[in-house]
Amino acid sequence: MSDQVYKKIELTGTSEKSLEDAISGAVEMAADTIRNMRWFEVVETRGRIVDGKVAQWQVTLKIGFALEQQ
């Protein structure tokens, strides 16, 4: 068994419903084009306010994926 090498990318997901939806949406969209995803780390949480109410959640996350061996 050989050692594994990983790469990280940073994405920001958004949702009008919840933090979880923002995270899930970002991970699911990334899964369309990135193979071997292994983990995510939330690095920033913020939101948009409209008329004194939370209108949108924004979550920046790092996704780690394993590089394929040649």
Image (spheres, rainbow, N blue to C red):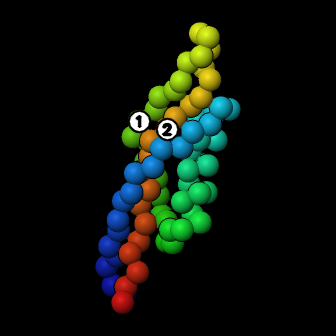
Furthest residue toward right = 17
Residue with the mark numbered 2: 59
- The crowding category of the residue bearing disc 1, from other C-alpha atoms within 10 Å (few below 14, some 14 to 19, many at least 20), is few
Q: For mark 1, give the secondary structure.
A: strand
In the displayed structure image, the side of residue 28 where residue 40 appears, left or right: left
First in residue order: circle 2 vs circle 1: 1
**Front residue of this view, candidates 42 and 15:** 15
Q: Amino acid at mark 2?
A: Val
The residue shown at (51%, 72%) is 35
Which quarter of the rendered picture does the C terminus lie within?
bottom left
- The crowding category of the residue bearing disc 2, from other C-alpha atoms within 10 Å (few below 14, some 14 to 19, many at least 20), is many
Task: Give the Cα separation between the discs numbered 2 and 1.
Answer: 6 Å
The residue shown at (61%, 57%) is 28
Furthest residue toward top = 52
**Front residue of this view, candidates 54 and 4:** 54
Q: Amino acid at mark 1?
A: Glu
In the displayed structure image, the side of residue 22 where residue 8 appears, left or right: left
